[in-house]
Image (tube, rainbow, N blue to C red):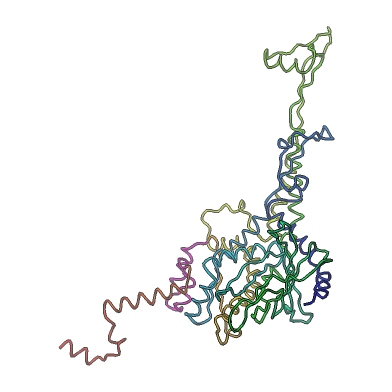
Amino acid sequence: MEVEAMKKLLQNTQARRKNFIERYSTSKRYYLNENDITSKNNGESKTKEEDAGKESKNPFRAADNRVSSNFHQLLVDQEAGYLATKPPTIDVDDDKLNQQIKNTLGDNFGLRLNELVVDAANAGVAWLHYWIDESGQFRYAIVPPDQITPIYSTDLNRKLVALRRSYKELNPDTAKYSWVHEYWDKDTVTAFKSRDEQFTDLQPLDDRFTIYDAATGVETGTSSVNNHGLGRIPFIAFPKNKEKQPDLYHYKGLIDVYDKIYNGYVNDLDDIQQVFLILKNYGGQDIDEFRKDLLKYKAIKIANLGSGDSSGVDQMAIDIPTEARNSMLETTKTNIFVHAQGIDPTDFKTNNATGTAIKMLYSHLELKAAKTEAYFRDALTELVRAIMNWLHVPDADSRPIEQTWTRTAIQNDVEKAQVVSQLANWTSKEAIAKANPIVEDWQQEMKDQEEDVKNRNDQYGKPDALNGGDDNDEDAKRS
């Protein structure tokens, strides 16, 4: 791509990119417990004592506690833990190929999937990039969502036709940051750089990629263009929902209301709920002398003016109405978990719940997780097909791919085991292995069962019926 064409593309996608980054940044702030209530403290939760050096403009409202509630992080991690703690099992109807795919995804695939759920919840869509390294090995990594601006076709298929990736990079020679802009299509990637996001000084990044001679493999120079040779844009979107909307905006207003009520409550406790002493005809010189006399002698000097004098010390206490505030806090918290489709950890008090009761507890979370899984299935299928293409599987783009996702939730294992036991005689071994509550990898369980049968046969000898023997031979042996 030429410089002028790239500059025009960057300018045309910049408004959409900025709007996306603004929404993502807000979600990320709330995930890091830097709610809007803490904006005056640069995102840090502070109480009045920590900010006591500042004088208040209103002496009757000196307290300015700003503590944010971490609901968003709890709700996002709740879904990520429920949906992606255990990575889904991939089955392409070939045990050897299954193992190759599993090895390529790596031992940390579950953690990567968990991170994708968190990114998708905060940004509306998470992104994964894959490539082939110098040694020919398939690699993949998660790309921060705010670096990616996709370009889709305008037809109903909404195919990814190009992709812009922009990020800051530190030059170790000059110790200065510059912007790197990559343009990806199905065949090549072209790199550019600029000092800022105004793109006035946009120029090709000529030393970005190393060029090798195809025949000899000898390095011949560098270029701003690289032929990645993958036949498709090597970025996979993991959307959270159809609109690619971050989760926060379903309940952000409720979190802000909760923070406002809670911190207002704390401020009132600091400002109002204390005891005031009202002195009438105090006989001392100043308030400091009053404090000293009270501490030292447990007594106060009062000037008596004669008959009918009302000299003395009265006590005044101001109480705060708590019932309305507590009720509003509880209602707001309940609504947060309802709108976020999460589980309030303080609301479940049953110690011996049945399987049905547990399912009801997880019902809202399951609806949200099932929707996320539906969108992630397509993305994961695309990743598996990319791996199979790298492995040169002939039918990589058409082979059926089965995914088995496992939820991480409290469950009544006794009830589940009883159901499995009752259905064992009328259900396939594969279905039993998948439903067994003590089995984590059903494919490995099937292999273990086959190995156990083989070991028993080797130890005791196979029955003649299995060996193809006949009854006459057995009768002859007996005689």
- The spot of residue 404 in percent (x, y) is 55, 73
* Residue at horizontal 55 percent and vertical 61 percent from the top: 409
Q: Quadrant of residue 8?
A: bottom right
Chief secondary structure of the magenta portion = helix
- Whether 138 is among the magenta residues is no
* Residue at horizontal 74 percent and vertical 40 percent from the top: 65
| 260 sits to left or right of 100 | right
- The spot of residue 340 in percent (x, y) is 69, 60
- The spot of residue 274 in percent (x, y) is 74, 29
Extreme left residue here? 479
Q: Compared with residue 306, is residue 89 higher up or lower down, i.e. above or below? A: below
Is residue 188 in view? yes
Q: Nearer the viewer, residue 149 or 169?
A: 169
- The spot of residue 445 in percent (x, y) is 43, 72
| 42 sits to left or right of 96 | right
- How many discs appear? 0
Is residue 250 in view? no
- Whether 427 is among the magenta residues is yes
Q: Nearer the viewer, residue 367 or 459?
A: 459
For the N terminus, the quadrant is bottom right
* Residue at horizontal 67 percent and vertical 51 percent from the top: 70
| 476 sits to left or right of 136 | left
Q: Nearer the viewer, residue 351 or 8?
A: 8
Q: Compared with residue 308, is residue 13 higher up or lower down, i.e. above or below? A: below
Q: Point out the stretch of residues depicted in magenta.
A: 411-439
For the C terminus, the quadrant is bottom left
Q: Quadrant of residue 30?
A: bottom right
